[in-house]
Image (cartoon, grey):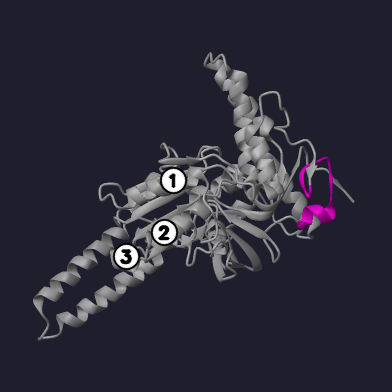
Amino acid sequence: MTTATIELTASQAEAGQKIQDWYTDPDSQVFRLFGYAGTGKSTTANILISQLGVRLPVYAAYTGKAAYVLRSKGAEGASTIHSLIYLPAMKARAKLDQLVKQLDTLLVDPLADPRDIQVLQRKIEIEKRKLESPDWHLKEQEESDLYGSDLLIIDEVSMVGERTALDLLSWGVKTLVLGDPAQLPPVDGAGYFIDAQPNHLLTEVLRSALDSPVTRIATTIRAATIRDHDYGVTGLDGDSGRIDRLTVADLLSVDQVLVGTNNTRWQTIHLLRALKGLHHPMPIAGDRIMVLANSGSAEVFNGQQFSVINAHDVPDHDNRICLDVLDDDGAPRQLTCWRSGFAGLKGEQAAKRDGRGNVVAATYGQAVTVHKAQGSQWDSVLVVDESSVFASIEGKEASRRGDPGAREAGHRAGQRWLYTAATRAAKQIRIIDRLRVQP
């Protein structure tokens, strides 16, 4: 990625000086560079990394989609955090088996060095302890690309929880994290990095970024006052903006539908599958699925999406289905999933309860909630605007607490929800109050 001709703003240059000071400070491992949509966080980071003369930068993000976006911006080799530092249980067991075979060979070798035997025995005990957990297992230092690296850059950090953050930092590598504090607060214990004060906050939206309707819309939403019931988005801006209705062709052309509630999500899933001719109650070729819970054994993580290319029954297992899928990079996989996850909200809950081991808890991914979409991005996004739901919930909670600013608190909650939804789009964002489709 060519960045040498880009001139930094005053705030970006100030961030650069802070990062240079931090990079040479042996007592500080993490630098939080936060900024709103269009302020140039990623561009600034790339320029500054070049100026620092970093030899081996490593890029990572929580989701496969976010890692793909990083690579498209020139972050060579960007990967998911999980693949960077964790070894799935299946591979950990294979490693243990290999160590046991090496030990067996040494034990029958009369010339074997007893110290080598002791080293192997210690390694085997370590691997056995790792396998006591059904989750992902931390790689050995030399097994990760972080080994010997000068700098780790993590984008979209809102979804990174405490355990994963501490595991990342255990390599001792300088870590630059990028995030947007105006988005929804993270859920399910995430937010280790984003829930702290930034070392530098970029607030100036760049003119070049404002050439994009998506950035203009996101900025308008973020700046909306309490009097703006539509958060400033009342109509179209180019091919993006608020719409009253859309055609079937319009609906089928979007990359992702985002909603607020699970009831709306399932209604949208049923509609989209019907329009695509996917009438089977279980996933078939042409479906999109989403993982509901981490599984180290199956090598999947919460929120990961796949495209289904084939489906098979699993003999002697009525509640399992085997799916041939493609991941976001187009790589083929085979997943065994709980059937219950595709049978509605209660089924999803049952699948998550059963989702340990190598059977995946998953559901349909044609529509996802904005909370679940955090950390991902698609070229074209349709948002079913349920910001009023979150505004009402927060407003009532604030009123119950006796907060005199309850109305404003509700407004801000809806605003953050819609802003987060808008920032999930790369090229086109359309917002509709209800999913009304015309022929």
Residue 402 sits above or below residue 185 on the image: above
Whether residue 274 sits left or right of residue 109 in the image: it is: right
Whether residue 259 appears in this view of the structure is: no
Q: What is the C-alpha distance between the residues marked 1 and 2? A: 13 Å
**247 is within the stretch colored magenta:** yes
Q: Which residues are magenta?
A: 238-253
Q: Quick one: label 1 or label 2, which is nearer the N terminus? A: 1
For label 2, the SS is helix
Residue at the location (51% across, 50% down)?
8
Whether residue 74 appears in this view of the structure is: yes
Q: Amino acid at mark 2?
A: Gln
For label 3, the SS is loop
Residue 92 sits above or below residue 425 on the image: below
Circle 3 is placed at which residue position? 147
**364 is within the stretch colored magenta:** no
Q: Amino acid at mark 1?
A: Ala
Q: What is the C-alpha distance between the residues marked 2 and 3? A: 22 Å
Task: Using the image as rendered, state which of residue 147 and residue 262 is in the foreground.
Answer: 147
Residue at the location (84% across, 53% down)?
248
Circle 2 is placed at which residue position? 51
Give percent across and percent down for residue 393: 61, 26
Q: Amino acid at mark 3?
A: Tyr
Whether residue 275 sits left or right of residue 92 in the image: it is: right
Circle 1 is placed at which residue position? 15
Q: Residues within 10 Å of mark 1 (few under 14, many from 20)?
A: many
Q: Quick one: label 2 or label 3, which is nearer the N terminus? A: 2
Q: What is the C-alpha distance between the residues marked 1 and 3? A: 27 Å
Q: Quick one: label 1 or label 3, which is nearer the N terminus? A: 1
For label 1, the SS is helix
Residue 89 sits above or below residue 21 on the image: below
Of the residues tagged 1 and 3, which is closer to the observer? 1
